[in-house]
Image (cartoon, grey):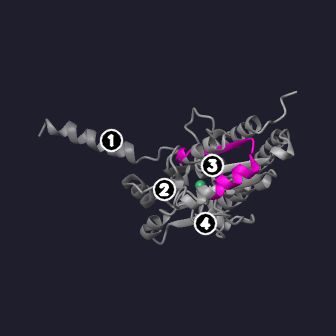
Amino acid sequence: MDKRTPWIFTLLLVTTVNSAPVLGEASFNVIASFSVIEDLVKRVAGDAVRINTIVPAGEDVHRWEVTPPNVLAVEEADIVFYNGYGLEPWMRHVKAMAGDTLTLTALAEDADYAPLAINTGHYKGDPNPHMWMAPEGAAAYIDIIAQTLAQHYPEKAADFKTRAADTREALAALDQQVKERLDGIPQTNRVLYTSEAGMAYFAHAYNFEYASIWGVNHETLGSAQAMETMNRRLTEQRPPALFYESTVPFIHMDALARSAELTLSGPLYVDTLSASDGAAYNYPAMLRHNAELLHKALGGAREE
Ligand SMILES: [Zn+2]
């Protein structure tokens, strides 16, 4: 018994330490569906909230499968921030396990920002989910994040409001910066051909002609018909470059580029941020990286 006492004592001590709040008074748990939403939620929440992200950076948000650690995180959460408009087909599992006390917030669906329709593929005509790819769309997410956090944690509402206002300002500055960089691309070269329709809001915001092989990454990728349609378009229009995204199979755009003898450039970041030491380590870096890539591939004017 003497030998067991220290053992039990240690166990109790470890249990006590582990159950203590790690972030001081912070005991709010929220979930972000993927890395871009995690970044936006962090900007509003600061250190007051613990954020658990379902789809890790680098993975495709469309084609994720919910893991046991995801399930445990959802069970502990107060709010799940997700994009909606079908971006996360796996959210049906999260919804099925959600109890009455879990708030599910679909940022794109609740945002005060006009959705664009998907213009090709199986989901043609549905709202295009990639609204965050325009800084004004991301700013509309910020408003919903701030409102939702304030409803749940009213004692922190003033902090959330201040942080949301600062973030909106930063996003407006980013928007201007990206616009100025892209203004260096001649109008005739402002054509953005990608695998998925994920850059639609970006193209709309910065005045690019836009086309993609398929609509969203969770449909059939690169059907014979879709490849033929794009091939015909490329042969007729011969854009200066084609682009692929970090989360899609490379083979479709690569085959089209080689067949039409066009330059292939990438990766664009859309459905995920990069790792923390990569080019798209946060939301502004992601947009700046994409703008830089387009500028280089589409014959942007050189730096004065
Ligand atoms: Zn996507």
**To which residue does mark 4 refer?**
85
Tell me the magenta residue range. Answer: 229-251
**To which residue does mark 3 refer?**
270
Q: Quick one: label 3 or label 1, which is nearer the N terminus?
A: 1
Reply above or below: 178 against 154: above
Q: Secondary structure at mark 4?
A: loop
Instruction: Name the kind of residue labelled 1 in the image.
Output: Val
Q: Quick one: label 1 or label 2, which is nearer the N terminus?
A: 1
Q: Where the C terminus falls, by quadrant?
A: top right
How much space separates mark 2 and mark 3, taking CA atoms? 14 Å
How much space separates mark 3 and mark 1, taking CA atoms? 42 Å
How much space separates mark 4 and mark 2, taking CA atoms? 15 Å
Q: Secondary structure at mark 3?
A: loop
How much space separates mark 4 and mark 3, taking CA atoms? 16 Å
How much space separates mark 1 and mark 2, taking CA atoms? 38 Å
**To which residue does mark 1 refer?**
14
- Report if residue 242 lies within the magenta region: yes
Residue 273: image quadrant is top right
Q: Quick one: label 4 or label 1, which is nearer the N terminus?
A: 1
- Report if residue 163 lies within the magenta region: no
Q: Secondary structure at mark 1?
A: helix
